[in-house]
Amino acid sequence: MTSKRIAFKVHGTVQGVGFRDFTQKCATSHGLTGWVRNTTCGRVEGEVQGDEQTVQKLLQQIDKGPRHAHVVKLEKRDLELQDGEDQFLVMRTAESMFHSGA
């Protein structure tokens, strides 16, 4: 099994619809680690780590989102693996740290 860490940023109607809880529930059910949060620019972003195939499965779920969400774009990029994570957290709203690849 190959492990992978992906940063993601979700555009659309993704705040106020339970998107972070949905993402955490899906990630936890797949045994993935990382985090998710709202951004001050109205999007949702996060990082997810785990088995490559399982990470892709989660990204497909995020691309659809919970029932009341409307995802118009899902950006993603590869990151270095991080040691020591043991859960998937919902973080406080903050400025976006997501930067598209060059």
Image: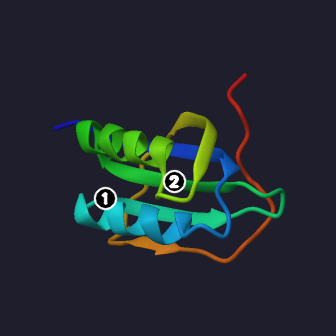
Q: Position of residue 4 (x, y in %)?
A: 36, 41
Q: Which residue is mark 1?
A: 32
* Residue 16 or residue 36, whichever sits in front: 16
| Amino acid at pointer 1 | Leu
**Displayed quadrant of residue 11:** top right
Any part of residue 62 in sight: yes
Say which quadrant the N terminus sits in.
top left
Q: Residue at x 46, y 44 (%)?
A: 64
Q: Residues within 10 Å of mark 2 (few under 14, many from 20)?
A: many
State the colouring used for the structure image. Answer: rainbow
Residue found at the very far bottom of the displayed protein = 92
Badges 2 and 1: C-beta atoms under 8 Å apart? Answer: no
Q: Position of residue 28 (x, y in %)?
A: 30, 67
Q: Position of residue 82 (x, y in %)?
A: 43, 55
Question: Seen in the image, is 100 located left or right of residue 35?
Answer: right
Question: Seen in the image, is 17 located left or right of residue 59?
Answer: right
Above-or-below relation of 31 to 10: below
Residue found at the very far top of the displayed protein = 102
Question: Seen in the image, is 76 located left or right of residue 66?
Answer: right
Q: Residue at x 43, y 53 (%)?
A: 48
| Amino acid at pointer 2 | Glu
